[in-house]
Image (cartoon, helix red, strand yellow):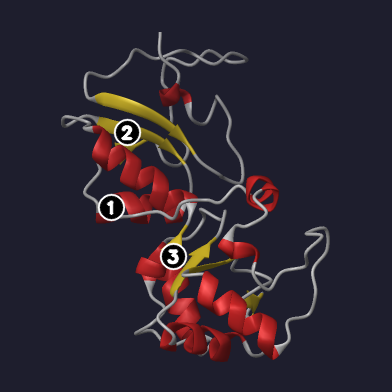
Amino acid sequence: MKYPTIIDSQQLFREQDHPLKAGLDPKCRSTKPLCPDSFAKVMKSIDTFIFDADGVLWLGESVMPGSPRLIDYLVKHNKQIIVLTNNATKSRAVYAKKLAKLGYNSAKMNKNNLVNPAAVVADTLHRSGLDGKRVYLIGEQGLRDEMDELGIEYFGHGPEKNKNEEEGSGAFIKEKSDFGRNLHSSTVFVSKYENPGGMCE
């Protein structure tokens, strides 16, 4: 999986002759509505367009008007499209199904266009070389789905029962021999009493 290079906008605006400034407000302090001429300049100078998801491509369960048509136009002109969201509760596959349901062309907009923390973390773990060790996971379904896809074994998701726990205190359990990483992603609630396995002596 290849991730886009993030451009430092402040550095970009300091470079007076940078090609990406073509068609933008010369003061670079405010945005302007695009006219046909300025839009043509932007199209020539940018190869990759990065969109947020909720509030940009959709709002709740409704598509943002005109968004699918814009995406089709950009793809038609050989632009790379990346959907970047900070929501790790769902996998890229789930988001891809939502895009298709909302009218986006699934042949042009699929999970390979999507980047979210769950996918990045799973990919990083996969490349880090766990050597057969499992991951102690505190996270939601999106992260579990991405790890399943890459064959990463994990445990600890959901409440655990600790027989040695003393009332009023969290008992530290010994590290398991196949314990490789402790991973905490977004979750509705986490407690040291419900997830003691992430704490080791």
Q: Residue 85: which quarter of the image? A: bottom right
Residue appearing at x 58%, y 15% in the figure? 167
Distance, label 3 to label 1, CA atoms, is: 17 Å
Instruction: Tell whether label 1 touches label 2 (CB within 8 Å).
Output: no
Residue 7 pos. (x, y %): 56, 51
Q: Would residue 93 be found to the left or right of residue 42 on screen? A: left
Distance, label 2 to label 3, CA atoms, is: 24 Å
Residue appearing at x 59%, y 13% in the figure? 169
Residue under label 3: 114
Residue under label 1: 148
Whichever of labels 2 and 1 marks the residue nearer the N terminus, that label is: 2
Q: Helix, strand, or loop for circle 3?
A: strand
Which image quarter holds the C terminus? Answer: top left
Question: Exactly how many numbered labels are in the figure?
Answer: 3
In the rendered structure, which amino acid carries the disc numbered 3? Leu
Q: Nearer the viewer, residue 82 or 151?
A: 82
Which image quarter holds the N terminus? Answer: bottom left
Which mark is in front, 3 or 1?
A: 3
Picture disc at residue 135: 2
In the rendered structure, which amino acid carries the disc numbered 1? Asp
Picture disc at residue 32: none
